[in-house]
Image (spheres, rainbow, N blue to C red):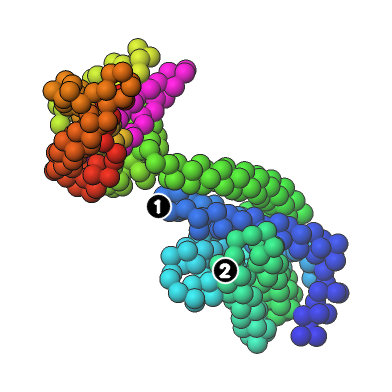
Amino acid sequence: MFRVFNCLVSEHDLRLVVIAGLVCFLASFTAISLFGRARGLSGRARAKWIVAAGAATGCGIWATHFIAMLSYDPGISIAYNVELTALSLILAVLITSLGLSAAVYIKGGWGGAIAGGIVGAGVACMHYLGMGAVDLPGRVTWSIDLVIASIVLGMLLGAVALSIAMKRNDIRSSLLAALFLTLAIVSHHFTAMGAVEIIPDPTRTITALSLSPTSLALAVASAAISILSMSLVSAFADRRVGDKSLLLTTALNNMTQGVIMFDSDERFVICNDRYLEMYNLSRDVVKPGCTLLDIIQHRAATGSLTRAVEEYRADLVTSMAQGRTLSAIVETPTGASISVVNKPIPGGKYWVGTHDDITDRLGNAGRQRRWRVVSRKRVGQGQALVGHHTECVDVRGGRWPAADHVLRRDVGRAADDDVGHRLARHDGGDAEVADQEAPVRADE
């Protein structure tokens, strides 16, 4: 390790080493942030963010390497082969993207460690291919023990970094994972540089297709900082949008109503889980990119739509284009009654449909109507009996004790029994309530 320390202190400009470390940390933090965003997504969106995270990591490794090489002074002039330099960047992006993909898709506790090992291998590939791009009047020999140590350090610290990033996705964990990823890249680079020994060879010359280290390193640093800054801003902005979107989705999925939205081109925008449950619809059909016609046809296939598909679609599209609200009550195969209201949103770009299960409300309204009919019948029976038992009425005293007795005996018992039997047939347990209700008096 003394050889590594001596190389770092005596053959490098420490000011540029610090800059290389800062660029590396910025790249690592950006990569971890993008990686965290990818883990919260699925499908194509996840793949895109994994590629973005791999690009940020590869670019950071590449920039760190060449800024550190700018600080390196072996005592002879050096330059860099353009083709191998470009290839080293491509290789870094590809291998680190592969490693991040492994972290996302490999199940189990070893996913992060395996992914970190792959990322560490990507660092090694980029470094040694980049060193192969060095063009100088001499030959480069390597100390094998330090080469092996550099690869092991990069893979181990990379495994630690990705393991931390896999456990939690908060700022503190992201910073800690970025720190270990920075250590993986930096420790690999300077350990590998300690393994280098240059033997001068005047017969070897710098080729024409080479760039000076100053021009290359400055260009790499400028491009890397710009790309990484934009990526980092994008990651934070997307995370905030994603958090708000998650809150909106949670709110929608906790509504008792089904909600669905379309745009003016009849494209599906969003719906909540309640809408899918009401009509027994599949997420494989109702998904971004599907059309109004696709969903109507799916509803017809599940039996939740009895109208003609084209007729229903035409009514909806015409009403929304004219700015009219369209309301209806539909029956589902399970016997549920759904109140459907389709309403255009001001501006004409979108329209929303709400689907409310009103089965219980309709049932309660029916029971209330039956109670009113029974009550009127009982009052009518009481009035009829009063007419048949006028001899029981004490007109001078303003009382009718006999009539009251008759009402209790004839109406109270017989009518209540009749009501109880009727409600038992219609409402089951409601018969007990009818039997317990006080008889109707003639003066009520």
- The N terminus: image quadrant: bottom right
Vertical relation: 429 (above or below) 137 = above
In depth, the one of 272 and 47 nearer the eye is 272
Alpha-carbon distance for marks 2 and 1? Answer: 21 Å
Q: Where are the magenta residues, as a range?
A: 328-357
Disc 2 or disc 1, which is closer to the eye?
2
Element type at marker 1?
Answer: helix
Q: Amino acid at mark 2?
A: Lys
Report x, y in % for residue 16.
Answer: 82, 61
Going from N to C along the chain, the mark reached first, 2 or 1, is: 1
Question: For residue 133, which quarter of the picture?
Answer: bottom right
Looking at the image, residue 252 lies above or below residue 35: above
Query: What amino acid is found at the position of numbered circle 1 in the picture?
Result: Gly
Q: Please tell me how crowded label 1 is: few (under 14), some (14-19), or many (20+) other residues with Cα within 10 Å.
A: few
Name which quarter of the figure residue 58 lies in.
Answer: bottom right
The furthest residue to the top: 322
Q: Quadrant of residue 384?
A: top left
Q: Is residue 20 magenta?
A: no
Q: Position of residue 399 (x, y in %)?
A: 31, 25
Query: Which secondary structure class fits the magenta region best?
Result: strand
* Numbered label tally: 2
Q: Residue at x 81, y 80 (%)?
A: 5
How far across and how far down the image is residue 208, in percent? 65, 54
Give the residue number, with chain letter if any, for mark 2: 167
**Can you give x and y, in whole percent of width and height, for residue 253 in the image?**
42, 45
Residue 43, which numbered label?
1
